[in-house]
Image (cartoon, helix red, strand yellow):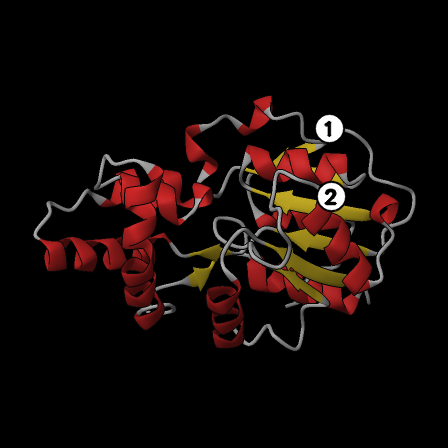
Amino acid sequence: MKPLPARIEGVLFDLDGTLLDSATDLHAALVAYCAEVGAPAPGYAAVRDVVSRGSSAILRCAFKENDEALQARMPRFLALYQGMLATHTRPFDGVLTLLESIEAREWRWGIVTNKPGFLTEELIQRMDWDLRASAVICGDTLPVKKPDPAPVLLACEHALIDPAAAVFVGDDARDVTAGRAAGLYTVAVRWGYLDGGDPDSWGADAVLSHPSELAALLGLQVIA
């Protein structure tokens, strides 16, 4: 584990698999879509493993098709998902306390996700985070998405955070790649979906197993 920067101004997070456990609702949307088109639905575990890779990877769990065919299925799948967006989705254990502790320190926090904007914005509103997050950068905010560092840098700009004084937290190798290229301290988390990968192999500055460990690393006072 590498030491933190001497000065911290804020923390940026990936969304699905880092702040929110959304796999149950995404799996339910895929099951509903498969029922509509008469296809067998994959099990929950297969879908959970690929949530961090996005909607195409989720659809590919059920349909072994090329990208063009999967894109044709996308609008209906996303519409079904939007209808059940926050039915079972909840913050991971310890996340709410972590965010409150960051705010109590008067640091800024934000979100950088590859999820489409219309879903991200509604989901963040459902979580009552829309007025708390200092930056929300979605998968379609820019022409590029993670692992490109541009969305992370834009989040720093929106949140008025110096990248050299910021931390980026995620559950996928793409998060570490993007954060490192943007010049942030990177944290890989074991509590997320991981895309079948080993977070210890991603080159993150720290690898943690629970949000409370991140609070401890940052020297935050836990808010009761």
User: Residue at (39%, 63%) from the top-left corner?
Assistant: 89
* Dots 2, 1 in contact, CB < 8 A: yes
Report helix, strand or loop for mark 2.
Answer: helix
* Residue bearing mark 1: 1
Q: Say if residue 85 shows up in the picture.
A: yes
Amino acid at pointer 2:
Leu
User: The residue tagged with tag 1: helix, strand or loop?
Assistant: loop
User: Which residue shows up at 55% across the image and 57% down it?
Assistant: 94
Name the residue at 62% across, 59% down.
141
User: Could you say which is closer to the camera, residue 105 or residue 76?
Assistant: 76
Question: Tag on residue 190?
Answer: none
Q: In which quarter of the image is the N terminus?
A: top right
x, y percent for residue 95: 57, 58
Image quadrant holding the C terminus, namely bottom right
Foreground of the two, 174 or 185 = 174
Q: Distance between the residues labelled 2 and 1?
A: 10 Å
Residue 216 visible in rendering: no
Q: In which quarter of the image is residue 49?
A: top left
Residue 72 screen position, x and y as percent: 30, 52
Q: Residue at x 36, y 41 (%)?
A: 57
Residue found at the far front of this picture:
68
The percent position of residue 80, horizontal first and vertical second, equals: 28, 66
Nearer-the-camera pick, 175 or 63: 63
Mark 2, residue position = 217
Query: Which numbered disc flags the more N-terminal residue, 2 or 1?
Result: 1
Q: Is residue 191 left or right of residue 223?
A: left
Occupied quadrant, residue 6: top right
**Vertical order, 131 against 170 (above or below):** below
In the figure, is residue 50 to the left or right of 155? Answer: left
Residue toward you, 30 or 216: 30
